[in-house]
Image (cartoon, helix red, strand yellow):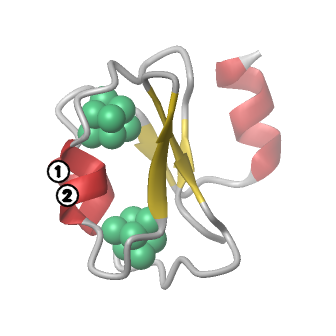
């Protein structure tokens, strides 16, 4: 699955935006959002995030931690 931003952990620092080689991440009012249709799952954004806000876990896990 594509990278996914955990909204509650994202601090809007844009490090992930700058790290993505294909510009799949954009900012929406201080929150990073990944376009899953273009993400190549390179994990560069996850490594760049200082706040652990980016995950590749299944959606079930996301609901548990993000809801
Ligand atoms: S690097 Fe992490 S905290 Fe910074 S904008 Fe991206 S997801 Fe949010
Ligand atoms: S996994 Fe790679 S391609 Fe996908 S959003 Fe993160 S940096 Fe961009």
Q: Is mark 1 within 8 Å of ligand 1?
A: yes
- Front tag of 1 and 2: 2
For the point 20% across and 58% down, which residue is it?
A: 18
For the point 56% across and 24% down, which residue is it?
A: 7
State left or right for residue 59 relative to residue 16: right
- Dot 1 crowding, Cα within 10 Å, few <14, some 14–19, many 20+: some
Q: Is residue 65 shown to the viewer in this render?
A: yes
The kind of secondary structure element at disc 2 is helix
Q: Is residue 52 shown to the viewer in this render?
A: no
- Residue 67, compared with residue 12, is above or below; it is above
Q: Position of residue 37 (x, y in %)?
A: 70, 78
Image quadrant occupied by the N terminus = bottom right
Q: Which residue is mark 1?
A: 48
Q: Which residue is mark 2?
A: 18
Separation (CA) of disc 1 from disc 2: 9 Å
* Residue 24: numbered disc: none
- Dot 2 crowding, Cα within 10 Å, few <14, some 14–19, many 20+: some
Q: Position of residue 53 (x, y in %)?
A: 40, 33
- Residue 39, compared with residue 57, is above or below; it is below
State left or right for residue 23 relative to residue 17: right
Q: In this orientation, which residue lies closer to the viewer: 66 or 38? A: 38
Image quadrant occupied by the C terminus = top right
Q: In this orientation, which residue lies closer to the viewer: 4 or 35? A: 35
Q: Position of residue 23 (x, y in %)?
A: 38, 71
Q: How many marks?
A: 2
- Residue 20, compared with residue 6, is above or below; it is below
Q: Is mark 2 within 8 Å of ligand 1?
A: no
């Amino acid at each position: 699955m594509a990278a996914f931003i955990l909204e509650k952990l994202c601090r809007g620092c844009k490090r992930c935006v700058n790290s993505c080689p294909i510009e799949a991440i954009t900012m929406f009012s201080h929150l990073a959002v990944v376009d899953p249709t273009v993400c190549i799952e390179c994990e560069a954004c996850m490594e760049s995030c200082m706040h652990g806000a980016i995950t590749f876990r299944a959606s079930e896990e996301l609901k548990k931690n993000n809801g």
